[in-house]
Amino acid sequence: MISRIEEAIQKNLCSSSIVDKFPESLRSAIEYSVFPGGARIRPTILMSVAKACDDDIPDITDAAASALEMIHCASLVHDDLPCFDNGDTRRGKPTVHKAYGENTAVLAGDSLIINAFSCLALASRHSHSRVANLTLCLSKFSGFPNGICAGQGWENELNIDLKSYHMSKTGALFIAATQMGAISAGHDPDPWFELGARIGEAFQVADDLIDVLSDDKNSGKSVGQDEKNNRPNAIREFGLEGAKRHLQDILAGAISSIPSCPGEGELAQLVKMQAAKMMEINESKIIV
């Protein structure tokens, strides 16, 4: 599945370009921010849900997975900017603004957002209704008031609701992953909300643990950001052991929330595998 994801992203990245000449540094920064990628967990979940629902038009699923990963990568580029986290490393290498400069990093993130919706539009020849619903879903969980923009906005508030913050900051794109997978295969997205929300919440709690317990080398990114920027964190809310127990509870609920579908058993195994990875947490190294 990973090779399918990589091929789809490569095919769809900048696929709407109609000119022969373009800014080389911007193109390089865009590719730098996407390749090599991380675990590609969001498009993996999307494709897994689509497969569980029969995945009858793979080209739509490929476009949806590509668009979702582009939005995710754009959010990382923007999140690392000096005006936000001012991160030095991401995925084990210098952040985009460190490698290419702040101006180019902003443009790279913006370009990825626009290209995400462009690649969805190009897939509309297969099904106008499915692509319209995919576009609505992705825009809902990318923007305001329920998307990752709202998640970033919560960090500017004096009083932060941790659950709402986590739902928008991290949960939004996981909800998008499960719901877009269902939409890609022509299924109702509503029953898939809870699974996406629970996976997203689990990833955020695991990320909070990484931020406190890991280091830049093991995590592949700048850690200690929550303390540095005085942000809410599951460990502050529940304590260290409480945060770990909370993570276990969320993961157990995620597995039981999988809707009935033709590939339910195989999808459950994927969720269990991801859950096992998230629980491989100790004081010296955290694997997510």
Image (cartoon, grey):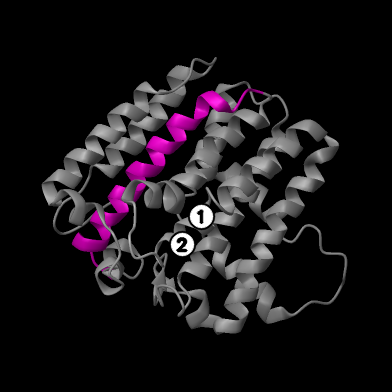
Does 58 appear above or below 27? above
Q: Is residue 208 magenta?
A: yes
Q: Say whether residue 49 is visible.
A: yes
Residue 212 at x, y = what percent?
A: 21, 62
**Quadrant of the image occupied by residue 62:** top right
Q: CA distance from mark 1 to mark 2?
A: 6 Å
User: Which of these two is toward me, 140 or 244?
Assistant: 140
Q: Amino acid at mark 2?
A: Gln
- Residue at point 68% right, 39% down? 134
User: Which of these two is toward me, 273 or 186?
Assistant: 186
Element carrying mark 1: helix
Residue bearing the label numbered 2 = 152
- Residue at point 52% right, 23% down? 191
Q: Which residues are magenta?
A: 187-216
Q: Amino acid at mark 1?
A: Ile
Q: Say whether residue 35 is visible.
A: no
Does 42 appear above or below 50? below
- Residue at point 74% right, 46% down? 120
Residue 42 at x, y = what percent?
A: 50, 44
- Marks 1/2 in contact by CB < 8 Å: the verdict is yes
